[in-house]
Amino acid sequence: MSDLLNRRRNHGRRFGISIKAVINHKIVLRGYRQQDWQERMSELTIFFAGDPHGAFDPMIEAVLEHRPDALVILGDLDLERPLDEVLASILGITQVYWIPGNHDGDRDEWHDHLFGAGLADRNLHGRVVQIGNTLRIAGLGGVFRRKVWYPRENADTRGWPTKKEWLHAMGKGNRWRGGLPRKHRVSIFPEDFEVLRRNRADILVTHEAPTCHPHGFIAIDELARSLGARWVVHGHHHTDYEAEIVPDIRVLGVGLTGVTTLDGRRIRPGMPSTRSAKRYADAHVRRGRV
Ligand SMILES: [Fe+2]
């Protein structure tokens, strides 16, 4: 062991550096990156909205009150009207982005009001978008499904690597509007993941959770690491929580209809159940607010 240490010391001396200097350099570099990242974060306020399931007033009220630079919706919108109509009152105030959730493929109208609405180009799934001068957000919407891809820690099952391959093998009777079944328009394919992992981003937003959640997936951890992301923000599980997956990657779960910021401020705490969110939405409809 001491031989190895001496060899390393001699190797360092040959290049005019010591082990201590290398360690100090790494600490300084890490400190610099942390500071650089925090400065980039502080230039913007971004709100992350947990699954609305049809109840949009909590996020609308939060935006009207605080006027953030951007709002990112984390899937399962369950839209009864087109998204640009539902959010019309805040479109001049903030930049709206979204990823789809599993339920956004449950009904024709929910699908069309999201993917065919005026804000269709704000879909972050499978791409990285720069917000402000330097901050980069990557999106992975939808869910893992056994028929397509199910990457658990001990069993990474891949049914179809690409949409094209599956479509080619699929009978015409199983297609929806000539393409993938509607349900699988919001399934995660390995090809979506591969495209993303070649990028760099500061924040990864997902519908599925990473492994810090009991129902999380190792693939989300891996994607965050590949992207060099410092944050993972996700919906789907209807729980407000904070965790870490590896040192320096912080995770924020955002609850049902909840609105939160990257520094963990719960602008609107998540609701306890979809029933309470529905009641909230219905009460606002009755009062003519939606
Ligand atoms: Fe979901």
Image (cartoon, grey):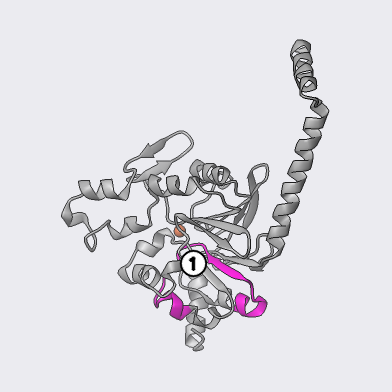
Any atom of ligand 1 within 8 Å of the CB at mark 1?
Answer: no
- The answer to whether residue 266 is visible is yes
Q: Residue furthest top?
A: 3
Question: Where is residue 112 drawn, in percent x and y?
Answer: 34, 70
Mark 1 element type:
helix
**Which residue is painted at 40% across and 62% down in the image?**
103
Is residue 177 shown above or below 60? above
The three-letter amino acid code for the residue at tag 1 is Thr
Image position of 144 (left or right of 41): left
Is 91 rendered above or below residue 230? below
* Residue shown at the point (63%, 55%) measured from the top left: 241
Write down the region rendered in magenta: 61-86
Q: Which residue is the extreme one toward the bottom?
A: 288
Q: Position of residue 97 (x, y in %)?
A: 51, 67
Question: Is residue 255 part of the magenta span, yes or no?
Answer: no
Do we see residue 269 in this rendering? no
Q: Which residue is mark 1?
A: 274
